[in-house]
């Protein structure tokens, strides 16, 4: 059983509670239930996994989820999502894993802020998603949770259109390369990720676009970069790519304190919306590179991991939303 509290400049205060059993009735099956509440969202999740499904080296299971999201920074609407996901994963080799899943979910969008663009106002309604997804990951790092040496590459695809009323195809990829220098406490990291989404005989709506900013691009607010209506709301983009160079190092304090520092340089682009959005609003979308650099301080404290990010914008557009300081605190007990 776990109970957690946390705080961040993005989600403000949050609390989570959960129960997880990794060896249910001594069978090796996994069962989990979690609920989390923050200033901007309420989520609940029930999951079950059975190893060696049908007598094969295959982990199979299901997940039932619900997520209610309120308005937040540049998101000018509320969203209520619920659904179920069936998944199966297996190892092809020692370093190569494959995961495939099917999900069906419903999304209801409402309570849209007055005065926003017609593109955002037109989101009001119900959306049914029926998707099949797959991902393949090659991982040769020394530790999948906290890698200090090695590399990984992961690619995924998601096809919406096996029923439902939303049809699109999404591709994403991630990669990382970790080089220890001097000793295992000084780590040079190269990280990259990107994606593209296209509608299938229909345009991609705002809520299905990619969004960048906040924890995934330091120096910018949640949904802080990319196409934006002149009325202020973020519109997301069909294409994104972000690269990071980071160097982590000890701060000369006793190792048992768990305090370290990092220098980082983030660069990325979020661009392109479909004509159904362009025709309903006046927007800004240069597609130019954004860049930030700064320093992070991390502390594995007695009350949980704490991270402070101090960022300096190197390159931005005048309509982007910057955030020079970010704070995250989370714990479980």
Image (spheres, rainbow, N blue to C red):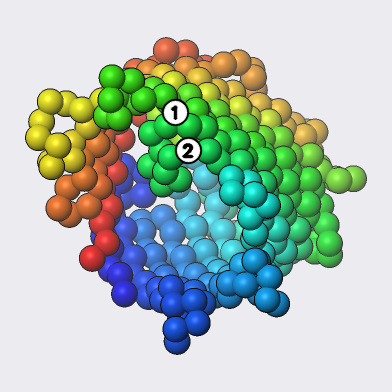
Residue furthest out toward the front: 94
Which disc, if any, is residue 115?
A: none
On the image, the x and y values in percent for residue 223 come to 50, 37
Q: Is residue 170 toward the left or the right of residue 4 in the image?
A: right
On the image, the x and y values in percent for residue 299 come to 20, 40
Task: Please report the residue visible at 50 percent of the width from the left and 82 percent of the height from the top.
Answer: 27
Task: Please report the residue visible at 24 percent of the width from the left and 36 percent of the height from the top.
Answer: 298
Q: Indicate the quadrant where residue 184 lies.
A: top left
The quadrant of the picture occupied by the N terminus is bottom left
**Residue toward you, 48 or 25:** 25
Task: Please report the residue visible at 73 percent of the width from the left and 46 percent of the height from the top.
Answer: 157
Q: Is residue 52 toward the left or the right of residue 232 in the image?
A: right
22 up-or-down from 205: above or below: below
**Residue toward you, 265 or 300:** 300
Disc 1 residue crowd, few under 14, some 14–19, many 20+, Cα 10 Å: many
Which disc, if any, is residue 141?
A: 2
Distance in Å between CA atoms under marks 2 and 1: 8 Å
Residue furthest out toward the left: 254
Task: Please report the residue visible at 33 percent of the width from the left and 20 percent of the height from the top.
Answer: 181
Q: Is residue 122 visible?
A: no
Q: Indicate the quadrant where residue 252 lies.
A: top left
66 up-or-down from 158: above or below: below
Q: Is residue 77 visible?
A: yes
Helix, strand or loop at label 2? It is loop
The residue where tag 1 is placed is: 178
Helix, strand or loop at label 1? It is strand
**Residue toward you, 20 or 163:** 20
The quadrant of the picture occupied by the C terminus is bottom left
Q: Are marks 2 and 1 in contact (CB under 8 Å)?
A: yes
315 up-or-down from 140: above or below: above
On the image, the x and y values in percent for residue 244 come to 47, 24
**Residue toward you, 294 or 137:** 137
């Amino acid at each position: 059983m776990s109970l957690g509290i946390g705080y961040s400049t993005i989600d403000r205060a949050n609390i989570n509670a959960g129960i997880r059993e990794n060896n249910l009735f001594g069978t090796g099956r996994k069962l989990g239930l979690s609920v989390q509440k923050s200033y901007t969202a309420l989520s609940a999740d029930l999951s079950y996994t059975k190893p060696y499904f049908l007598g094969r080296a295959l982990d199979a299971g299901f997940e039932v989820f619900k997520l209610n999201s309120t308005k937040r920074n540049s998101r000018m609407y509320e969203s209520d999502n619920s659904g179920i996901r069936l998944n199966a994963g297996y190892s092809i080799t020692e370093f190569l894993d494959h995961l495939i899943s099917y999900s069906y979910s419903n999304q209801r969008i409402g309570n849209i802020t007055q005065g926003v663009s017609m593109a955002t106002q037109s989101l009001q309604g119900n959306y049914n998603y029926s998707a099949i997804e797959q991902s393949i990951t090659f991982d040769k790092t020394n530790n999948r949770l906290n890698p200090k040496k090695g590399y990984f590459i992961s690619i995924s695809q998601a096809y919406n259109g096996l029923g439902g009323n939303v049809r699109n195809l999404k591709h994403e990829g991630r990669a990382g390369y970790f080089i220890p220098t001097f000793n295992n406490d000084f780590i040079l990291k190269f990280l990259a990720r990107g994606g593209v989404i296209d509608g299938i005989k229909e345009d991609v709506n705002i809520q299905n676009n990619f969004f960048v900013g906040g924890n995934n691009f330091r120096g910018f607010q949640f949904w802080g970069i990319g196409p934006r209506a002149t009325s202020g709301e973020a519109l997301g983009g069909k294409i994104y790519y972000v690269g990071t160079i980071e160097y982590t190092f000890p701060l000369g304090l006793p190792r048992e304190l768990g305090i370290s520092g990092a220098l980082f340089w983030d660069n990325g682009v979020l661009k392109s919306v479909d004509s159904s959005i362009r025709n309903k609003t006046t927007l800004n979308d240069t597609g130019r590179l954004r860049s930030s650099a700064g320093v992070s301080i991390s502390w594995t404290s007695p009350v949980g991991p704490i991270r402070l990010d101090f960022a300096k914008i190197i390159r931005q557009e005048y309509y982007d939303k910057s955030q020079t300081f970010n704070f995250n605190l989370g714990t479980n007990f």
